[in-house]
Image (spheres, rainbow, N blue to C red):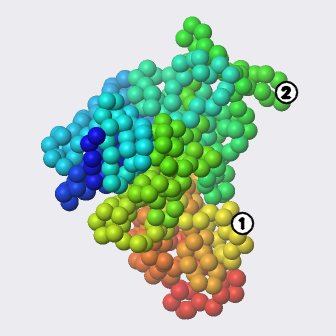
Amino acid sequence: MQHYDIIVIGSGGGAKISTPSSKLGYKVALVEKDRLGGTCLNRGCIPSKMLIHAAEVATTIDEANRYQILPRGYDVDFPTLVRRVSQTIDEESLSINPGVEANPNLDWYRGHARFVGERTLRIGDDEIRGDKVFIAAGARPYVPPIKGLADVPYITSTEALRLDQFPKKMVVIGGGYIAAELAYYFGALGTEIHMFVRSRMLKGEDFEVREEFERIFSQNHNVYMGKAPTEVRYENGRFEVLYEDEGQIQSIDCDQVFVAAGVIPNCDLLDLEKAGVETHPKGYIKVDEYLRTTAENVWAFGDIAGNYLFRHSANFEGQYLFASVIHQALDTPIDYTGMPHAVFSHPQIAGVGEREDDLKARNADYVVGINPYSKSAMGMALRSEYGFVKFLIERRTHKILGCHIIGHEASVLIHQVIPLMRLGGKLEDLLYMVHIHPALSEIVRNAARKARDELIKAGEQLSIELQIA
């Protein structure tokens, strides 16, 4: 049995521990059964955003006549687009290999790992044990138990990102962010989209953002809200998707079925019980505020721990564990203040902090400031017909409790608010900022001004400087 100071399972967010630990002189084992780089690089956020950018370009062309520009028409070279993105991703992933293989303190075990005892793993014929073990083994697409689905050649996000045959008509099962992003990608490039959403789209968003997104998205795609397929059939290269509508069985014929019904953690593949690592009923590993599992000297983070399902949160957690467990041995719990997110669909969404739904649930004393994109100089230039910035401000302290954006470049605009929330900022910190005119960022400032006006209506006595900011 080979012994290591540190074992890291997963090369995505896990790289935030494996590589820097090895550079400090620790003997490290990295376990990864697939390409280095994890889900995000190989089959997740990076290739999807490269493909979605092509969809955004197509949307810009399609809407060019709004600006008195008449497009001459275009064709989509779908196979070449997918090959280019896939090749770029593969080259990026393979570029990691030489550094790992040349690192004398880092051994890469290529294969599927299972625990066989306390901090002890078997990978193929190899058995390794570590003083400290970090589990960052991620999650995989969830496939719902729909009659016939397991017997047909459906695709998940893994296959969708490398699909080089352009589907003319696609059924999408799911209404979360993966479904919303990739349905937009295919739809913008010409696929006829039929999306089945069991309850609501993007259920984790603020309710006003969710409603606005559903309204706009449904104008461009066929969305079956509150419905789910009851059976999927496949014959002669065609799918038939059956569903119930007002007591009648209906069907849709299509050439592709894309399952995007969420993810499940990979806990069931690791034999965690043999290591003394417990999981929640939903399958995620139980961790405390220090990301410690129920087993001594075993930590878990990223998707498999289920606190946040983003690559940037996994990186943040990995950096925290490296600093607190390995580098400095700090006794400080992780602080998720200001953890943002974004949905790269159309329209784009971004948010940070609490939703108004959360504030209502805890009877918070707050005001709302909303400003539509159209009420700004750059919004006028964009001819915005939808989208807004929404602030949630604590009434007495003026603390920023949350900010939610739907519209053009939402994922960029939210970064005005993230550092303020991280630092415990208040509304006046944003209002006192000088915003470039007429940049799109003025929409955020205008929403902050609306929140200030609501504070005044609520009877707050504000300083003259704040009243005129």
**Identity of the residue furthest to the top in this view:** 236
Instruction: Reply above or below: 209 against 425.
Output: above
Element type where label 1 sits in the image: helix
Mark 1 or mark 2: name the one nearer the start of the chain.
Answer: 2
State the residue at coordinates (23%, 51%): 27
How far across and how far down the image is residue 211, in percent? 67, 51
Crowdedness near tag 1: few (<14), some (14–19) or many (≥20) residues, C-alpha within 10 Å: few
How far across and how far down the image is residue 364, in percent? 69, 74
Task: Write down the quadrant of residue 226 in the picture.
Answer: top right
Report whether 234 appears left or right of 10.
right
Say which amino acid is labelled 2: Gly
Q: Nearer the viewer, residue 442 or 332?
A: 332
Report whether 20 appears left or right of 408.
left
Q: Which residue is mark 2?
A: 247
Instruction: Reply above or below: 158 against 99.
Output: above
Q: Decide: marks 1, 2 in contact (CB < 8 A)?
A: no
Q: Nearer the viewer, mark 1 or mark 2?
A: 1
Q: Which residue is mark 1?
A: 361
